[in-house]
Image (tube, grey):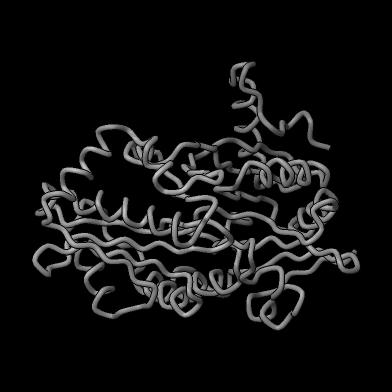
Amino acid sequence: MTVYHADLREAQADPALAALLGRSPTSAPFDRLDWLSLLAEHCLLADTCKIAVARDGDALAVLPFQKNPDGTGPLGTWYSFFVRPLTNAPQRAPELFAALARSLAPAGAARLAPMPEAEALTLAAAFRTACWIGVAEPCDTNHILELKGRNFAQYWSARPGALRETVRRKTARGKVTLRIETTFIDADWAAYEAIYARSWKPEEGNPAFLCAFAQAEAAAGALRMGIAEIEGQPVAAQFWTVEGGTAWIHKLAHDEAHRAHSPGTLLTAALFRHVIDEDHVHTVDFGTGNDPYKRDWMEVQRPRYALQFYRPAAVGHWPALARLAARRMLRPSSQPALVSPEAAG
């Protein structure tokens, strides 16, 4: 088994890596090499963006990460719904992930989040096998909708009455017109940025990254751009993508001056209808964050995890290890750490 570290440029030249980190019928945007490359170009320091790779014959596992002064961090930003390791041999994940963990040993510390539960548990066990000490703990909430074969009408009938009545009344008034685009239109993107600036949202972190991502998704046929207008003036906009049978809700905003007409709510309903009845997705993912409005649209909440691990020999991290041990001692017995310092090998 060989383990090495590649930068993103090297990864692009490796056919096996390109296949594992490429677009496929089951892929997610945040796993893809082109997403990671856009992050490196627009949001991060490119030279710190790496991929740990474990190979054994045709079996392959990868962990994208950032190399930083504190050790190993996630190759992700606020735009990433999750970060996680990937493998083309799930039955061999424990040993392949342990090899990844051993390859990160020189860093002395690893902090990775937000991570889906299954990958978090498997990777945490792999760090323990590789003689790291640490914890894996819930850090955020992911809201999703699982259609389970339902069409939009069936899904909509189960929404809260107040939401359905709002959509019925505001639609009947005929003030708001809606459209959903699958191509990148410069004027629509400019409208989205203007609406976002007038919305309740904080300042956009990296608009150049988001625009480049939207253009790439449009080229791949994955863009779903919703625009709501009143008398020809855009007043709400949403940026979704469809991939791997899932609709991913990346961005939404409305102009506060037109809030009384509920253009954002009407647009959300229209996009749900489109991805369910036209794209036939099996899941809609609203990303992380416990915003109350998400509960009206989604039905399942699942945790995201943060992994925090240290090498015992890394003297500089002993204070952090001591804090972890103290936290473990203070945690109620009903809330055990997923990987405790005592259990680490």
Point out the image quarter for the C terminus: top right
Q: Of residues 214 and 37, which is closer to you in this image?
A: 214
Q: Of residues 146 and 66, which is closer to you in this image?
A: 146
* As drawn, 195 above or below 202: below
Q: Position of residue 13 (x, y in %)?
A: 70, 83
* As drawn, 339 above or below 1: above
* As drawn, 126 above or below 326: below
Residue at screen point 40% across, 38% down: 290
Q: Of residues 90 and 154, which is closer to you in this image?
A: 154
Q: Residue 104 sits in which quadrant?
A: bottom right
Q: Residue 343 sits in which quadrant?
A: top right
Residue at screen point 85% across, 53% down: 92
Q: Position of residue 288 (x, y in %)?
A: 45, 46
Name the side, left or right, on which 80 lies relative to 264.
right
Point out the image quarter for the N terminus: bottom right
Name the side, left or right, on which 324 lies relative to 195.
right
Q: Position of residue 292 (x, y in %)?
A: 33, 36
Task: Using the rendered image of the protein, determine whether residue 68 is visible from the camera's viewpoint.
Answer: no
Q: Residue 54 sits in which quadrant?
A: bottom right
Task: Using the rendered image of the protein, determine whether residue 189 is visible from the camera's viewpoint.
Answer: yes
Q: Position of residue 318 (x, y in %)?
A: 67, 40
Residue at screen point 54% across, 51% down: 282
